[in-house]
Amino acid sequence: MSTDPKLKSQDARSSVSFTHNIMPPGEGRLVPIVRRHFNAEPSARRQPDRLLRLKQVECLTGCRKSTLYRMMKQGRFPRSVEITPRLVAWSEAAVQQWIEERIAASQATSSSR
């Protein structure tokens, strides 16, 4: 059996890759995530959305809690989803879209200079 952290199945219809959560050092243990990628048009198969906790959102965006909540209040960052009265999370798809928009905006301003 291979010990490679990224494994691919031999199935022609799909592949499975094993990756780890992105977490800052000392912020808990790494947990393997299984992602299944199907050989189909992206629009034909909708990927299930995940909910991200604050530490994961901070790690993905590089912004701290106060900045995220300020941008949410200003309408410049996706709103959190209330899971329970004391637990909120963010849609991974919404956060990824926000990141892509920031990259596109940055590239547009740098190419116009």
Image (cartoon, rainbow, N blue to C red):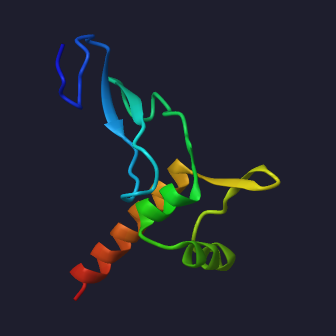
Residue drawn at x 32%, y 30% as measured from the top left: 18
Number of disc labels? 0
Quarter of the image for residue 71 reads bottom right
Left or right: 54 in relation to 109: right
Q: Residue furthest bottom?
A: 113
List x then y, in percent, for residue 108: 30, 76
For the N terminus, give its image quadrant: top left
List x then y, in percent, for residue 30: 39, 42
For the C terminus, give its image quadrant: bottom left
Q: Residue furthest right?
A: 85
Left or right: 66 in relation to 63: right
Q: Nearer the viewer, residue 79 or 19?
A: 19
Residue drawn at x 43%, y 65% as measured from the top left: 61
Q: Nearer the viewer, residue 78 or 90?
A: 90
Left or right: 63 in relation to 16: right
Query: Is the residue 55 above or below the residue 43 in the image?
Result: below
Quarter of the image for residue 99 reads bottom left
List x then y, in percent, for residue 97: 47, 57
Query: Is the residue 32 above or below the residue 80 in the image?
Result: above
Quarter of the image for residue 103 reads bottom left
Residue drawn at x 54%, y 55% as measured from the top left: 94
List x then y, in percent, for residue 37: 35, 27
Residue drawn at x 45%, y 28% as measured from the top left: 44
Q: Nearer the viewer, residue 10 or 113?
A: 10
